[in-house]
């Protein structure tokens, strides 16, 4: 909380050190987000997991007879794999592809989870998507030995890093980084072009109401102005003389208006 209040004090200018630019503020924000994520990660990892009954919300204690039956799947998920190895496999799959799957096999008599089987991402075909939140994901289709099998969402544990285009899809860390690089590249090009040759009037040449400028004269003035001042660096910072009471009204654009470009650096967070 101390870090949180210190951050907002600086953002609001109430602290001893005020960040003068939007970029500095955003960098501070990114650092603060990183700290918060680490704190949440550490605290969640220290939580002792417990089991609760759905019908009564009653905690299932360790001395309860059904506790061992419920907990067994998390100790020995299946006859071939230990949970420690399965977690390592899932993390490896997430790091490489951004997704991982576990198939839940239920007890045919009691309906409780009996085994967990990891599914290879290479066999994944598609997510069957719905149109509403109620059927957000209808199923997961896999190509198993040449046959397409669709599993219900109730039988699949789906771990993934959400894609920015559709949070139901997965984006690998490499794909996410590619997004960030592309965004940075195009935003830099956009910002450069914005100031050098923007698609809007940078200024207007105004005359007093008593001076009437014909259309042909106006076109000639604009043509001569562009010929004189448009182009590369050799045309910059040139002086000119305006007659007949003409004035230059600049269409100002502040750097703060382009602060959105720094949002590209938030993608990793």
Image: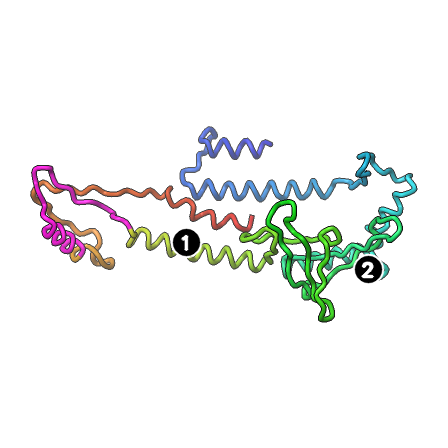
Residue, far top: 14
Q: CA distance from mark 2 to mark 1?
A: 47 Å
At a point 63% along the width and 57% down the height, the residue shown is 98
Q: Is residue 216 magenta?
A: yes
| Quadrant in the picture for the N terminus | top right
153 w.r.t. 28: above or below: below
Image quadrant assignment for residue 124:
bottom right
x, y percent for residue 139: 68, 55
x, y percent for residue 34: 58, 44
Q: Which one is in front, 53 or 249?
A: 53
- Give the magenta part as a residue range: 200-226
Q: Which mark is residue 61?
A: none
x, y percent for residue 149: 72, 63
Q: Residues within 10 Å of mark 2 (few under 14, many from 20)?
A: some
260 w.r.t. 183: above or below: above
x, y percent for residue 170: 61, 56
At a point 33% along the width and 52% down the height, the residue shown is 194
At mark 2, the secondary structure is loop
At a point 43% along the width and 57% down the height, the residue shown is 185
The residue singled out by tag 2 in the image is 81
4 w.r.t. 34: above or below: above
32 w.r.t. 81: above or below: above
Q: In this rendering, would 28 be left or right of 82?
A: left
At mark 1, the secondary structure is helix
Q: Which one is in front, 21 or 218?
A: 218
The residue singled out by tag 1 in the image is 187
Q: In this rendering, would 254 be left or right of 78?
A: left
Q: Which one is in front, 137 or 14?
A: 137
Q: In this rendering, would 22 be left or right of 178?
A: left
């Amino acid at each position: 909380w101390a870090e949180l209040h210190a951050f907002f004090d600086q953002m609001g200018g109430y602290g001893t050190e005020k960040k003068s630019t939007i970029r500095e503020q955003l960098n501070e924000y990114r650092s603060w987000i990183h700290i918060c994520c680490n704190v949440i990660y550490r605290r969640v990892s220290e939580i002792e997991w417990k089991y609760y009954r759905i019908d009564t919300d009653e905690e299932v204690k360790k001395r309860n007879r059904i506790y061992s039956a419920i907990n067994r799947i998390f100790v020995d998920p299946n006859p071939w794999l230990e949970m420690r190895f399965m977690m390592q496999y899932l993390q490896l799959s997430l790091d490489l592809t951004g997704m991982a799957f576990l198939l839940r096999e239920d007890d045919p008599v009691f309906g409780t989870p009996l085994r967990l089987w990891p599914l290879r991402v290479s066999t994944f075909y598609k997510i069957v998507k719905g149109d509403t939140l109620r059927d957000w994901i209808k199923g997961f289709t896999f190509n198993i030995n040449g046959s397409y099998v669709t599993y219900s969402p109730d039988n699949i544990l789906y771990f993934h890093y959400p894609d920015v285009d559709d949070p139901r899809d997965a984006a690998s860390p490499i794909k996410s980084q590619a997004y960030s690089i592309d965004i940075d590249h195009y935003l830099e090009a956009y910002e450069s072009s914005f100031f050098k040759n923007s698609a809007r009037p940078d200024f207007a040449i105004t005359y007093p109401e008593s001076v009437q400028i014909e259309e042909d004269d106006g076109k000639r003035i604009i043509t001569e102005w562009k010929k004189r001042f448009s182009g590369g660096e050799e045309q910059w910072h040139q002086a000119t003389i305006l007659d007949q009471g003409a004035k230059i009204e600049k269409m100002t654009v502040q750097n703060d208006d382009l602060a959105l470009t720094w949002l590209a650096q938030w993608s990793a967070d």
